[in-house]
Each structure stands twice: as structure tokens, then as C-alpha cells.
Image (spheres, grey):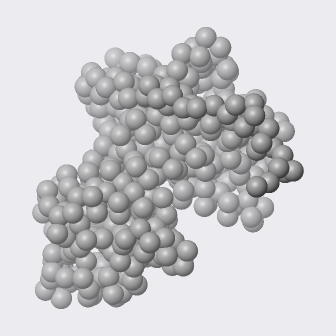
Amino acid sequence: MTKVQHDVKNTELATGGRFRIEWAEQEMPVLRAIRERFEREKPLKGLRVSACLHVTTETANLMRTLQAGGADVVLTASNPLSTQDDVAASLVVHDEIPVYAIKGEDNETYYRHIELALDHKPHITMDDGADLVSVIHKTRRDLLPDIIGGTEETTTGVIRLRAMAKDGALMFPVMAINDSNTKHLFDNRYGTGQSTIDGVIRATNILLAGRVVVVAGYGWCSRGIASRAQGMGANVIVTEVNPLRALEAVMDGFRVMKMEEAAKVGDIFITATGDINVIDVPHFQVMKRGAIVCNSGHFNVEINLAGLQKIAQGEPRLVRPFVEEYIVQGRPIYVLGEGRLINLASAEGHPASVMDMSFANQALGAEYMMKNAANLKPAVYTIPEDIDMEIARLKLEAMGIHIDKLTPEQEAYLNQWQEGT
């Protein structure tokens, strides 16, 4: 029995969770190197951290790294369907880290867990979607005097934080982890691409080859999804509102059209935009029989499920785990994972090797915030380029890859303007 405060599904799942955490750790050499340094130096000693992240094997290794650095850590889920219950149990039992997360928890439980994590009175918040920061600013402003800063993992969270900063509402500095090159160029593109397709296939067991896959958006996450779907033989259509990104999608070989047109021909629809009602009632009304709809954006607002329910006949029917059938004008439409992150609802999220760099940014971001918060104003910041480059260097080193260095002559040439043709 553990004396650590927690609310997890079943602590008896801890042994299986530990095996999976250790399996993921093998694929996270950069974070492991950081943890080894943290164990020696204890740069986070005395720091209270409240983390609101997807409770996965990779996140567990981040929590253990922060703990090794001397931090007092509490973890809660950043999505009701993204918790791996065995991992949550292992962190409680084996690492004595308080965890408040149960896969499939309702919204009331989800926000109760956030409140419990905030009762930790954090010095640093660690978010994936900015829910901790949002709740603090709305109802827990009593915590503000103790907070020195925060870190934010994902695109959607950074969008929320920049909106707060623009309105003058943000009361402490936050590091936009998502803006690091070693995060969004790899995690968002390769991680989201692979894990989203993995989630769709696990939920449905369908063949992608020959299907028309509609990808909403062409940011880094959507690029990864489109690329992986195409690689599995799908005929990919991209929808966009940004002319530049739409042009890029065309040049990358994808068909681009409005959603109202794509809705008529798509077999599978995947959203990853960070915006609301990307797939809306008029789109459902023209979809083909058996169309599959899912989301890989952070919040479950990209698909208008309330609108779908209004035009559907009767209540949705759960026909497979994470697959709900709605009947619209006599035609079945299938929604995956309640419109939540399909890569975490029905699959395991991003592979550990890509999360290695993302969570290296989180660990080093927390260290940077602790050292520099006194000199930072309430705003959204990007991790310094030298830290970003160091993470890339460590990743290459772990992969056994060596690259060239500029010679003194080459450096001098790049730093002058006199010499021409």
C-alpha cells in the first residue's frame, strides 16, 4: 500500500505499468542523460511542480526526471481519455508521485483532479493545453504569489496563452515548449502522423489503401498525418483556410478543396487544426454512408458533436470500443474516441523516441524557468536556441550519427560581407 495521495483506477496495475515505462525509457536517451545530470546536480531542489499532461509511459519518464532533479511533482491528466491506467498506478506505487488521472473520467472528475493538482501550490505549472494556467487565472488566483512560471507542451495551449498575453491577462511567464524546433518539427509531424494513423487503425481495423482520407489543416501535425496516410496508400485531400499552407499542400502532391466539397467524397476525416466546428452540421449532411470522423487536435471541439446529435436519428450506438455510430438521414456515420485525441484515446500516443526530445525540452524548460524567472515578464517565451540545438546534438549522438563542423575559414566567410563572386 502507498501513502501517497492519488486517484487512479487501480494500484494493482502498477507492475505492468513499470515494465512499459522501462520499455519507453530505452527509446529516450536524451531525457535519460538529462536525468543522470539532474541526479548529480539537483537543479530543481525545493521546486513544486504541478503537471497537467497526458499520463503515458513517456510522461512517466519526464516525471521521474523532474523528481531526480529535486522537484516535488504532482501529475494530473490533460485529457479525459489520454490516461494509461497502469502508468498512473506505477508512478504512485513505485515512484511515490501523486497522480490524479483515470482513463474515461467525466468532466467533473477531470476538473476535480486539476484542482487537486493545484492544491500542491506549484512554483511551476507544466501544461498540455493550458488548463492549469486557465483555471489558476479564472478561479485559483490565490496561487499566483507562489508561481514563478510555467511550460506549455502543445500548439493549442500556446494559442490560448498568446491570447491571454495579448489581452494583458497572463500573470506569469510561460515557456512555449511547442515552439522549440526539436519539439514541433518532430513530435508534431512524425509523432502525430504515426500515432494518429495508429489510433484510427486500432479503433476500426480498416485498410487505408484506396480510401479517401480528408485531413483538416496543414500545420505540422496535419502534415504528418497526411504524409503517413499517403504512405499507406490513401488518396489524401487537405482542407485549409491559410493560402500559404494550402499552396504547400498542393506542392506536396495533395488535393486541396473546401470542406464542403471534401465532405461529399471522403471516407475518413481527421481534424488537427486547434479550432472549433471544423467539421460541422452541413458537412455531416452530405457525407457518404459509413464515413469515419475523428480528431487529433487537443480539444474535442473540432467536430461539432452536439450538432451531429441534433440531426441524428436516436442515440449513438457504440459498435466497437471507441467507435460510435450516428444515423443521419438513414446513413451511418462513425465518430472515433468521442471526438477526443484519437491517437491517445484508442492508441498509446506518440512513440517514445520522438517524445524524448519534447520532454527534454520540458525538463530543461523547467530548469531554465527556475534560473531565469526573476528576469522574465508575464509573457510567452521560446526556449533559447542553444538549448534547442543541444537537444538535437544529444539526439544525434544517441543515434550514433556524426555531423561536420565549420572550419575557422568557413566561419569567417559566413561572418563577412566583403568577399563576393
Residue sitting at x 33%, y 87%: 261
Query: Relative to 341, is 129 on the left or the right?
Result: right
Residue 411 drawn at (x, y percent): 75, 37
Query: 15 or 212, which lies in front?
Result: 212
User: Most extreme residue toward the right, as rendered?
Assistant: 418
Query: 295 or 396, which lies in front?
Result: 396
Q: Is residue 121 visible?
A: no
Residue 54 drawn at (x, y percent): 43, 43
Tally the numbered discs: 0
Residue 196 drawn at (x, y percent): 32, 55
The N terminus, quarter of image: top left
User: Most extreme residue toward the top, as rendered?
Assistant: 40
Residue sitting at x 55%, y 74%: 244
Query: Relative to 341, is 313 on the left or the right?
Result: left
Residue sitting at x 75%, y 65%: 167
Residue 326 drawn at (x, y percent): 20, 75
Query: 94 or 193, which lies in front?
Result: 193
Give the answer, above or below, for where 209 lies relative to 45. Answer: below
Query: Relative to 50, is 162 on the left or the right?
Result: right
Q: Is residue 239 visible?
A: yes
Give the answer, above or below, for where 244 lies relative to 233. Answer: below
